[in-house]
Amino acid sequence: MKAEALVAKDLTITTDGQAMIDKARKDNVETVWDRYQAQSKHCSFCEAGLSCRICAMGPCRINPKDPEGKRGVCGADADIMVARNFVRMVAAGAASHSDHGRDLVEVLKRVGEGKASGYSIKEPEKLRTLAKEYGIECEGKSDLEIARNLAYLMEEDFGTRLDAIRMVNRVPSARLEIWKKLGVVPRGIDRETSESLHRTHMGVDNDWVSLLLQAARNALADGWGGSMIGTDLSDVLFGIPIPKESAVNLGVLKHDEVNIILHGHNPVVSEMIYNASQDPRLLALAKEYGASGINLAGVCCTGNEVLMRKGIPMAGNHLMTELALVTGAVEALIVDYQCIMPSLGKVAQCYHTKMFSTSSKAKFPGAEHVEITPENAKEKAEYLVETAIRNFKNRIKERVLIPEKPLKQFTGFSIEAIIKALGGSITPLVDAIKAGKIRGAVGVVGCNNPKIKQDSGHRALVRKLIANDILVVDTGCAAVATAKDGLKVPEAAQLAGSGLKEICILLGIPPVLHMGSCVDNSRIMVLAAAIANHLGTDISDLPIAASAPEWYSEKAVTIALYAVASGITTFLGPTPPITGSKNIVDMALGGLENVFKAHFVVEADPNKAADLIINHIETKRAKLGLDSKAKV
Ligand code: BF8
């Protein structure tokens, strides 16, 4: 099939996306869907996890149907090969989130040392609460001294000096006991990733069960370590999100303003760009260049970070990143790291857009590299905004198409904000669940994937869940999808079942609560732990689930695994590359229940997945002695 055969409405359910795919065709710009089509059909060995390029005796493939081909050159069978590949996916995902978390520790340390002039402690109370969790005596100490000491201790969390990372103290005791018995309590954030890579080198760990347990420990080091530190320190440095109104879709770009798109994951850069965009000198310069203002818009998780804290509008999720540039209305694309397609520099060059990379870890073809560090962030952010302003004159009006009007959305539901909305404690939420008005809750997370019509999985799944009185909390690109679907406004309560609708109207909240970026899945973990502790039970007993209906990234695999290892059954849309090992498939879909009291479910059809989730939640309700509609 040729690229021309692709029809926009078959690729995405979003009308802004469809308009931009058509424009990309007209402008002769290649997109992710063109490349996906060119790459199809994918290698069935790789899809099953049965190809290995770990060492130079290979690469090897195992053909399960061929009696001669059932082992790699080293002797690895299908179980070992699939397990090794899976562990490496989890290690990469954990490394990504956790290295992001480490960057925040470094900023905190520099702030404490007085070497990061553009940054400050925005939430001294949260800093002190965290410091106390870490055993730091705060009495009589300045914020900066506490920040320094906390950063030093958090650096230890990344290393090899501890028996357990400190934030496992947040885990309900019943869950921690399970981890202790299995030997999967994470010891050090980097240590687990490093050990995963060691174990999967040829000739080290060749027991698939042992390998998978290490994958779980590595994932937990992310969920209750690197990601959790990332979230908490982002709150300390940039503010705890509170509910606020914003907007979503490509309509947030403006004809008469300098449009700057922020892409990536770490708020360390985007917060500084935000500050620069408020600078009176730069606002005056924008006027001089004929623009009526400076318009920041986010995509992906950097977008979620500045949306949650500053209300910066969201232009789109993962598959919209190229299409945002195709509008022809973007003066600058400023990126940090993760989920940034290497194609973006080329797309930018098809228009007047300037692309800037800012992290020493993430450079891109077609991008100018302007390295941002804690020491120079203010000055470099101002340079980037100024360059964007000076580029406004190069916008070619005839090539601009901003489709759609933006939709309203409400965001900013940190745990602190949720508790405040509930009147100061989680008791009303627990009571609503007990009374059956809210049947349970689901964390819908993860990405877009060109294998799935964009956002179709999120829409179908989430609409069905809320219609069945299940509260949805979401993060990452899933959160952008539901905002584009109009589910993040209080009026969307009308789409909810009668019980959830009643609660939403009472509290004035939407039935789908935005909890942030992908590292902020740690907020969901902490909330689940708080509810379990409130009920004196384990997370696995709660009527909750997780789902990633359109996942693509290694980070999503890590999230899914730490959710399951934390006791939350997780429903995946795309199938992970494990089908080459029957033992591992059986373990993932069932056996894990005996290990972690939670397991994976793979269901590509979001309607069927919603039915399975509803039944899972009702079954958990029955086990808790609550009224239940479970189908046995
Ligand atoms: O970390 S949801 S596509 S942007 S991986 Fe990436 Fe997936 Fe989006 Fe955020 Ni998460």
Image (spheres, helix red, strand yellow):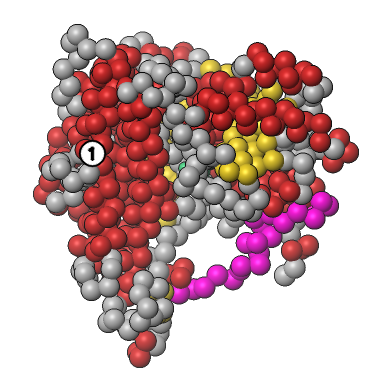
- Report whether residue 248 is seen: no
Please give the name of the residue rendered at 37% of the width and 78% of the height, measured from the top-left corner: 56
* Count of numbered tags: 1
Report the span colored magenta: 25-45
Q: In the image, residue 268 lies at what x, y percent? A: 46, 31
Residue positioned most to the right: 398
Q: Is residue 359 above or below residue 593?
A: above
Please give the name of the residue rendered at 77% of the width and 44% of the height, measured from the top-left corner: 351
Which quadrant does the N terminus fall into?
bottom right
Please give the name of the residue rendered at 15% of the width and 41% of the height, measured from the top-left corner: 162
The verdict on residue 469 being magenta is: no
Q: Residues within 10 Å of mark 1 (few under 14, many from 20)?
A: many
What residue did someone put label 1 on?
157
Tell me the quarter of the picture where residue 581 sits.
Answer: bottom left
Tell me the quarter of the picture where residue 115 sits.
Answer: top left
Q: 150 or 594, which lies in front?
A: 150
- Report whether residue 82 is seen: yes
Q: Locate residue 296 relative to residue 440 in the image: left or right.
A: right
Q: In the image, residue 105 lies at what x, y percent? A: 33, 32
Q: In the image, residue 342 lies at what x, y percent? A: 59, 53
Q: Locate residue 328 relative to residue 283 in the image: left or right.
A: right
Q: Is residue 300 above or below residue 6?
A: above
Q: 163 or 572, which lies in front?
A: 163
Tell me the quarter of the picture where residue 487 sits.
Answer: top right
Q: Is residue 25 above or below residue 254?
A: below
Find numbered disc 1 in the image and state the secondary structure of the residue it sits on: helix
Q: Amino acid at mark 1?
A: Asp
The verdict on residue 34 being magenta is: yes
Q: In the image, residue 500 lies at what x, y percent? A: 45, 24
Label 1 C-beta lies within 8 Å of the nearest ligand 1 atom = no
